[in-house]
Image: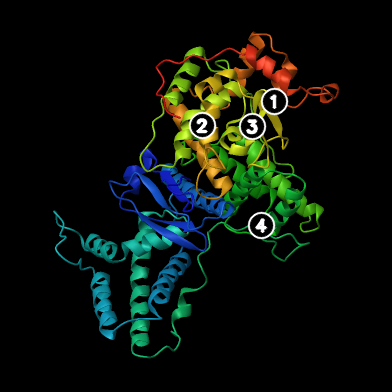
Amino acid sequence: MRRSDTRNPQFVLRIPKDLKASLVGMTLEVPRGDGFVSIRVSEKTQSIRFSLGTSEPTEAKQRQAVAVAHLERVFSALRSDTLVHLTHKQTLALAGEAYRLLVERHEDNPGPIELWDMAMIVNATALAGQPIGLDWPLRIETKEERQLRALEQRFGAVADQVLGRNGLVVDQKSRAELLFQVGLAYNQATVQLSNNAGGDYSPDPKAERFGPSFKPSEQPSTPSPARASAVPMRRLFEEWWREAKLAGRSVSTKDGYGTALERLITFIGHDDAARVSAEDIVRFKDHMVSTPSPTTGKPLSAKTIKDSYLAGLKSIFGWAVDNLKLTENPAEKVTMKSARKQKVRQPWFTEEEASLILSAALNAKKEPGKPPQRFALSRWVPWLCAYTGARVGEMVQLRKQDVWRDGECWVMTITPEAVTVKSRQMRTVPLHPHLIELGFVEFVQSAPAGFLFMWSGTERASWQYAKRVITDEVRKVVTDPNVQPNHGWRHTFKALGGEVGIEQRTLDAIQGHAPRTEGETYGGVTIKAMSIALGRFPKFSTKEPAVQSN
């Protein structure tokens, strides 16, 4: 999820290159809140892009997760060529959805009767197999081919709409039958709307012929005999979070677990926790293992599936059992083996890599029309990470009041009060002399009150966006995927600090690492001790002369 304006969160997902040819001409119906967004894919379309329709960060995150899960299912079907074959009942259910969409869109203000009389003529022409206009084939068509082309021309877009809303990619035979049934449904809808236009709003006596809403062929999980009533998973999640928040769980944990739950709901096709079985969780895990991510084109890592998806589901369902809302935890015994990641290099930056990153930061350019915090983010955050070994999120959230003078020493306070700190503990660390030499203190003093590197929108949304900006900028300079673009500074700081003899306990205090023993929790490391240690920490060099601009 990207943002051109954090008050208007945007969903942006690049179209996978291997699926571009298959997607051209399709209309993707992507869920957004209570509705859908229609995206017509053309030759020029590079990304699926739309507004998430909310400025509330948690809601935006959930909407993004639902949209990604929906598109994953469509992409997976296209990649594996596992096209759905619709039963006759399913085809009519989808045609009924097309009928309802047209009627609901126009029934309040149907316009003149003549409009719908003309629509009936056009519909009948297509159903009779007569293409409209001058779009004639270059070869002689069979009767069936001509009829299919006429139906596609008239009803193809609405067929894509109802298929897209249900995450379906169907075989050719099913599509042909669906187009015909949508045509009949549209003809029925135009008759009803013509009646409405003439002042007759009596119910359509044939509206019930389509049957119930579309249901997948696969049978849903059998409800537990001990609990027949529905237990909405989204409601469970909100109740779990109210308690977890009081217990000190982070918003990042909430976001991760919420994403896992939304993808499970999309995968199994319902929101009832009482109907979720262990078999459903296993199938979901297998789906995650085998389905490429729309953003990377690769399946999720075993660690992500285990530590984020499965852990989140176990926690939420486990809380539900403890609070007598479910009789069993379907995710309790489902696990995922994850092998230790192969190590092909040291996790810290080489001298060359560090120099390239810091040179790029030192020579960052101000962009016209962009807020000053945007420039400051690129200019200062890499240097702050380099000389503190802090997490990038801790530096991104710095405020003007967090940088201050303690006697003769300039320091900064890293506190969860700003946005978040992983350990949930504040710490104060001195500024390295080189940061002062580069003009960081002068920059802070001249900056307006508030966040130094974050701008419009909610705090957490702006914080997440700023982190992504830095990650993308560093990755342009250091492209080796075996080193983390921001976390690499934590390893680098610890390695270089040890090289010049700084005590491990002091390095831990500066970086915010927990004490290794109970004894180390006593006394602590003073600002003076940290300042003396940083005075011994080596000065980073750069590749190019700096642009003199704060």
Dot 2 lies on which element? helix
Q: Is residue 265 left or right of residue 439?
A: right
Name the foreground residue: 92 vs 344: 344
> Cβ–Cβ below 8 Å for labels 3 and 4?
no
Crowdedness of circle 1 by 10 Å Cα count: few (<14), some, many (20+)?
few
Q: Amino acid at mark 3?
A: Trp
User: Which colouring convention does the figure follow?
Assistant: rainbow
Q: Would residue 142 be visible to someone looking at this image?
A: yes
Label 3, label 4: how far apart the Cα atoms are: 46 Å
- Picture coordinates of residue 277 (x, y %)? 69, 52
Circle 2 sits on which residue? 443
Circle 1 sits on which residue? 407
Q: Which of the two discs, 4 and 1, labels the residue nearer the N terminus? A: 4
> Cβ–Cβ below 8 Å for labels 2 and 1?
no
Circle 4 sits on which residue? 233
Name the foreground residue: 199 vs 74: 199
